[in-house]
Amino acid sequence: QGTRDHPPAQAALRERLLGAVVSCFKRHGAAAIDTPVLELRETLMGKYGEDTKLIYELQDQGGELLALRYDLTVPFARYLAMNKITNMKRYHVAKVYRRDNPATTRGRYREFYQCDFDIAGQFDPMIPDAECLKIVHEILSDLQLGDFVIKVNDRRILNGVFAVCGVPENKFIPACSTVDKLDKMPWEEVRSEMVGEKGLSPEAADRIGDYVQLHGGLDLIEQLLQDPKLSQNKLAKEGLGDMKLLFEYLTLFGITGKISFDLSLARGLDYYTGVIFEAVLLQQENEHVEEPVSVGSVAGGGRYDGLVGMFDPKGRKVPCVGVSIGIERIFSILEQRLEASGEKLRTTETQVLVATPQKNLLAARLKLISELWDAGIKAEMLYKKDPKLLKQLQYCEDTGIPLAAIVGEQELADGVVKLRDVATREEVRM
Amino acid sequence: QGTRDHPPAQAALRERLLGAVVSCFKRHGAAAIDTPVLELRETLMGKYGEDTKLIYELQDQGGELLALRYDLTVPFARYLAMNKITNMKRYHVAKVYRRDNPATTRGRYREFYQCDFDIAGQFDPMIPDAECLKIVHEILSDLQLGDFVIKVNDRRILNGVFAVCGVPENKFIPACSTVDKLDKMPWEEVRSEMVGEKGLSPEAADRIGDYVQLHGGLDLIEQLLQDPKLSQNKLAKEGLGDMKLLFEYLTLFGITGKISFDLSLARGLDYYTGVIFEAVLLQQENEHVEEPVSVGSVAGGGRYDGLVGMFDPKGRKVPCVGVSIGIERIFSILEQRLEASGEKLRTTETQVLVATPQKNLLAARLKLISELWDAGIKAEMLYKKDPKLLKQLQYCEDTGIPLAAIVGEQELADGVVKLRDVATREEVRM
């Protein structure tokens, strides 16, 4: 339940999609690493907040207590700490596991791919952070997924808002996770959850509401930097200063048109410490799809400066910022689009089918195909002793093989091969 | 325990190796599929004989009882049956799991990659089987692993041998798994295990010994086809007939020089029903490595005509033959060879570092690198506001970046970039 096989057509589309993502990661100079699907349970515990209950645990088999990885970020932090690496730009494309209620029509599975790019190291502020946003912009543009916006916020700004609105510090995290729901429910409902479930005072909630419903660009940053209350809060001021720097760099990258500084963006995970971001696709107005794939976030990430230190015996910190591309949702969109277009993706790359028009020519086919393989040519033949020529050509049409190399008695006698273009039926002897 | 992280250098080597294997599979017209790492426990039970105890089981979490896949063959058979597919040529490169005693120095892990190519369908005898052997031959030749031999046998021949030697049918499988040890221990020990542990009569064991120590080529097949006892056994006769056909096809492929018909080859798994094979590397005589990686089998496979039927409610059979490349052992060999050569594999593909020679030029770097990325060029820069030029060039040398694109105050004023070849120090303004 919540997992799926990928038949060849899906596997081919996935290969194309992952290829585009990985080529962007490589364009930005990232190296690949791979870590086991299995992690020690204790490595994963206490890193995901409420979501810890979604971790798949392996049976105790008399050895170590193991679990399936929940994401690629915690294993990366564990890897850095274990190997005392303080500086690394890496990507990792692999499957992760969540014992969630699957909602496969909306692209939510228990086993799914993640594509992560992260930069670890002590650097000048916001330069790696800006690169992560550039990467999201490049990938979403390359894949031509339609219009999108990348929401940006900073945990320090959010915490500053909570502080100046009179929220006690031990309620920052619950307040944060409630704010995160603003993209799915109206402010009134979020407010009543804050007051009812999370125990915030109505006044505090109202004050929070004035802030978290704001979104904009550099102008909003400037406005908040002048805000009489917020400008007095050290954390918020730091966050706003960095946000301004980030926008400066994003302007140089020429991508601010798709960036929205959005104070309602909170993101669920506990480990973020600074900038956070999330890309969402915008439903085009002229799209009249009957049942559009409901798309939410297609990429997200942020800065997590404390996570590596949690795995280091001496607590040495390695600042990190990274992005995860929501490949499954993008895959669903591309798949639906491919279906709508009626285009058939080839599942193989075969260039030529080796065929014979008469009987008793299996030996000739085997000899020729072997020569082609040895020359690096992608070739197939039917696994029959005496297939009909029509069947062989039909196989080419069914599977999209463009050429047939035909050896008949005459060709054998003449020492040639007849090469046939399957689509045009043109033939040359060679 | 028994798993490992792959740091960038290993991941890069692995990417190269898997690339060579996958490109061979594609050359033979295979389509990719992907299946979940998780399978229902019941799917895996009763398929691996004694090795069933090595299956990793997940904790019962109130839902389905799950396990991690043990190989890629059983999931493939399950996939075919579930989707009622009777005809398919597919490859699958993915990780599998075994709760074995890890012996990491010999390349035996609890999590490791398998690279499988299989052909499913009812075809004329031995044509797909021959292609599997051709694939092994191509891959081992391409990778230049040194001399190798591909041992070939047939379960029907082995069972025929047991029958004519007086082994009762219920002891075929134990006899088979004992014969399989002939590559690791001398006949005398195998014989005493047969008689002592497996309860065969000394006479039967001696008769078996006369057969299973034979190996050769077409001549041996002819000899056994004339064997007064074996030629009377229906199964053995079928197997020998097919073996003769196989050698005919392998002759057309021009690869019999590396093929040995070896009656001691048995292979452990229960599900094989016909041809079986295994490739082993031969230690070169002129190799004076102090501690050579102990290499065993680097590829193996065979025909399993009954497995798909085990998953079909009506027991409908789909004949299959396939090969699995032992990528971990090959990886160990290549890794050791790379180390010995002193060659350093690049872990990134970055083509150019964007650098500045003076202070306060971060904006120029960000603008230029953004243009390069947008043009599809693999580019990096240091994440510092004002890095020293020497540091930037040093980074190129450390990571193998061949070019530096330098923008200084003069270049900015002239509207040019200085492109520097890191190795030769040659510079052009452009």
Image: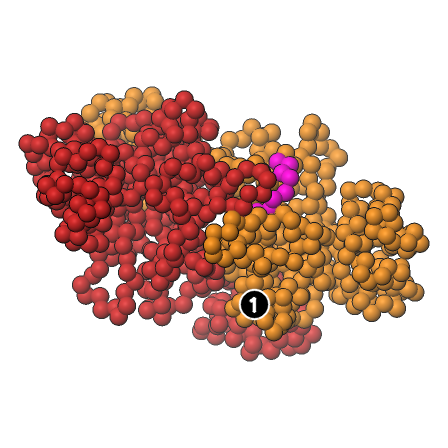
Chain colours: A red, B orange
Q: Residues within 10 Å of mark 1 (few under 14, many from 20)?
A: many
Q: Residue at x 55, y 37 (%)?
A: A64
Chain hosting mark 1: B
Residue occupied by mark 1: B81
What is the magenta range?
Answer: B94-104
Res B25 → quadrant: bottom right
Q: Position of residue A196 (x, y in %)?
A: 19, 47
Q: Residue at x 73, y 33 (%)?
A: B286
Whether residue B96 appears in magenta in the rendering, the answer is: yes
Q: Quadrant of the N terminus of chain B?
A: top right
Q: Residue at x 63, y 47 (%)?
A: B54
Residue B371 seen in the current view: no
Give left or right: position of B179 versus B355: right
Closer to the camera in the image, A240 or B238: A240
Q: Position of residue B63 (x, y in %)?
A: 47, 56
Give left or right: position of B225 versus B429: right
Q: Position of residue B213 (x, y in %)?
A: 85, 50
Res B328 → quadrant: top right
